[in-house]
Image (spheres, rainbow, N blue to C red):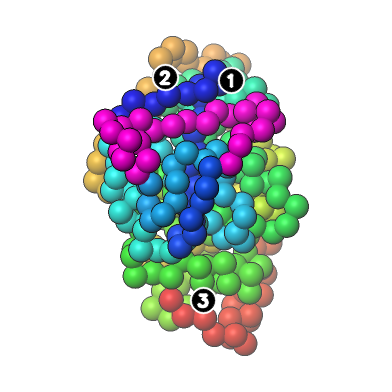
Amino acid sequence: MVLRFSLFDQKVMSQTHVPGQLEAERPVSFEQRLRGPKVEAIGETNAACNKPDTGPASPKRWIGIAMDSEFSLVVISFPDSARRDRIRASLEPLSIPWTFFDARREPRDHLPPYNNMESVRFWGRGLSKSEIGCAASHIDILTELAKSQQEKWLLVIEEDVALDPGFDYRTLVELCKISGIGYLRLYARHLARSRHVTWLGQRELIRFKKAPMGTQAYLISSRKARSFVRAVRTISRPIDWEMDRFWANGLYNYALFPFPCLELASGSSVKKQAEFDTGPSAYDRVVWFIWKSKEALRRFLANMYLRYRDAEVRRTFKERQLEF
């Protein structure tokens, strides 16, 4: 597939798919062009060019992240990724408005910039271009979600994730509203130390006390997106570690287990070796030790507070049963 970009920019494309709704092309305003380009898919024939990504939705309409619905889904994926066909096929049966978000390769001007000095000092090495782009993609999405004046819910997944077609993902919003949870993990790379909160039928609600890592799939509200965006000033660590700093950004690591999705056994597009590898100095190591000690104390205090929060959630679900 060949991509034809507008002359205003060549950075981003988003395609939104609303099941059961026919979407006509709309004119692109100058303000929208400043935010990103309209991209048209060019196939070998006119029929291929006009082929929708799923259902009756048109691929030519520029609308950014789908925020018309209270609950929608966004898939972070490179435009030329071979995984997109599989994603389209897997999302069609879910009847959820969904969007492709073209993965960033670097932060946009209005987003937090990459700071190599902080990365070396606090992470121990510089980040690779893939790690920077991955962080920029998630931050860009959450920044757009944070702008919503009404409470919206966004399910964010990466392209190497397979969702359970038999799971009702819309009920996750009800779970979060009942419990007051604004951020819910649907996957984790590591089974880090966690705390059982309550049983929800055959699944349990847990809360990770330490970083489980991974940003493959999570549900987040516009309120929690604002909390996260306010806490991020620079890109200086991988995005999963940044989001796992719940004591600093308010994204308490609640998760539904067993996870209703899985990571496919395919190579990650995020390379972790920095192109310009600079090690920390002796001064950096001293600063890191002091900072790490403070982080550990803040995490401990946050976990102590969250024990009371867990008890409130448990009492809530005793009064109102919800099963998954």
Instruction: Describe residue 276's horizontal placement relative to residue 45 as left or right.
Output: right
> Crowdedness of circle 2 by 10 Å Cα count: few (<14), some, many (20+)?
some
Q: Is 159 displayed left or right of 252 in the figure?
A: left
Q: Earlier in the sequence, mark 2 or mark 1?
A: 1
N-terminal-most mark, 3 or 2:
3
Q: Residue at x 57, y 60 (%)?
A: 71
Packing grade of label 3 (10 A; few <14, some 14-19, many >=20) is: some
Quickly name the residue at label 3: 198
Under mark 1, the amino acid is: Phe
Q: Magenta segment range?
A: 26-51
**Is residue 205 or residue 39 the one in the foreground?**
39
Specify the amino acid type for callout 3.
Thr
Give the alpha-carbon distance from disc 2 to disc 1, as whole Å.
Answer: 31 Å
> In the image, what residue occupies the spot 34% across and 25% down?
2
Mark 1 or mark 3, which has the lower sequence index?
1
Distance from disc 1 to disc 3, alpha carbons, whole Å, reads: 51 Å
Mark 2 vs mark 1: in front? 1
Farthest-out residue, left:
265
Which residue is the site of mark 1? 8
Nearer to me, 59 or 207: 59
Please provide percent x and percent y for residue 133: 48, 28
Residue tagged 2:
274
- Check the picture and name the quadrant holding the C terminus: bottom left
Instruction: Check if mark 3's residue and mark 2's residue have beta carbons within 8 Å.
Output: no
**137 or 100, nearer to the observer:** 100
Label 1 residue SS: loop
Percent across and percent down for residue 168 are: 43, 70
Q: Quadrant of residue 316?
A: bottom right
Residue 47 falls inside the magenta stretch: yes
